[in-house]
Image (cartoon, rainbow, N blue to C red):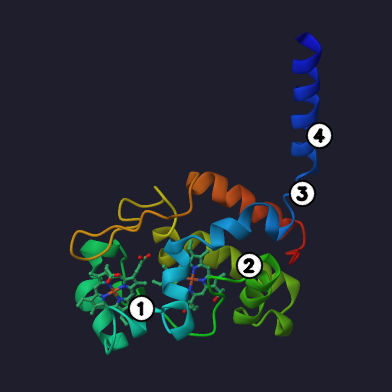
Amino acid sequence: MKTIVLVMVVVCWCSAALADDSRFSTNLFPKFQTRGCTRCHDFFEQNLGGLAFQSHKERSVEMCVVCHQKNVTGFEHPEEWFAQPGLYTSGMDARQTCEATMSASHAKFKSRRLLKKQLEEHLFEDPRVLWGIEGATPSSGVLPNGKKEDDLVKGGLALWKEQVNAWIQGGMKCQ
Ligand code: HEC
Ligand code: HEC
């Protein structure tokens, strides 16, 4: 019995040590792919069931804040509740999700330092990202008409920051 427990402890310890937190695929990929993030990023993607072609047909960008108001989203500036095409979307694998993020950030044209700063700002301070992280704000996941998105980034803001930092400090590798 004792040997079995010991073997299990060693196996768990080794696999934890092997999980490389600097890789995008280790922690961030599944988090980027929660619906709280992708429903917005898929908004204009017809083949992914984007809302612009479903329940949100013919709703202009000027109309977003009529329903997704400040008391719903919790944003100081409600107009930031907004979607655009050309971002990473659902259905992408880890490498594609990461590369699409880099391309949306125009990473090719920026120094590593600037890119790092902007990614940190976006991922830690953008109200839309915080809305998609469970518990990050009192309004995270809240939608108009008493609806709520349940598939948010789990584990809270502290863990999110730790995992994003590990990836950024590790060189923003798209693996
Ligand atoms: C309300 C819609 C919305 C939600 C929700 C949302 N995003 Fe975004 N996201 C955008 C828009 C719009 C952009 C385009 C850049 C901009 O306008 O700042 C963007 C850009 C990005 C980028 C590209 C980097 C950059 O600096 O532009 C990343 C990475 C990103 N979002 C990650 C996420 C993650 C992770 C979540 C969930 C935790 C999320 N987003 C939730 C709308 C949203
Ligand atoms: C007439 C009110 C109304 C307007 C205008 C409106 N929405 Fe919505 N939105 C809703 C409601 C209600 C839901 C929840 C049910 C659903 O999916 O339709 C929702 C859901 C969403 C979701 C899904 C989030 C998730 O994770 O499930 C996104 C993204 C979204 N809206 C973005 C937008 C954007 C961007 C605009 C402007 C182009 C917009 N909405 C305009 C009422 C509205």
- Which residue corresponds to mark 2? 117
Q: Is ligand 2 less than 8 Å from the beta carbon at label 1?
A: yes
Q: Is label 1 in a helix, a strand or a loop?
A: helix
Residue 15: give x, y in percent of width and height. 77, 38
Mark 3 and mark 2 in contact (Cβ < 8 Å)? Answer: no
Please name the amino acid that badge 1 sits on: Leu
- Which residue corresponds to mark 1? 51
Disc 1 or 4, which lies upstream in sequence?
4
Q: Nearer the viewer, mark 2 or mark 1?
A: 1
Disc 2 or 3, which lies upstream in sequence?
3
Apparent side of residue 110 relative to residue 120 in the rendered image (left or right): right
- Crowding at label 3, few (<14), some or many (≥20) Cα neighbours within 10 Å? some
* Quarter of the figure with the N terminus: top right
- Which residue corresponds to mark 3? 20
Please name the amino acid that badge 2 sits on: Lys
Q: How far, Cα to Cα, is label 4 from label 2?
A: 33 Å
- Which residue corresponds to mark 4? 14
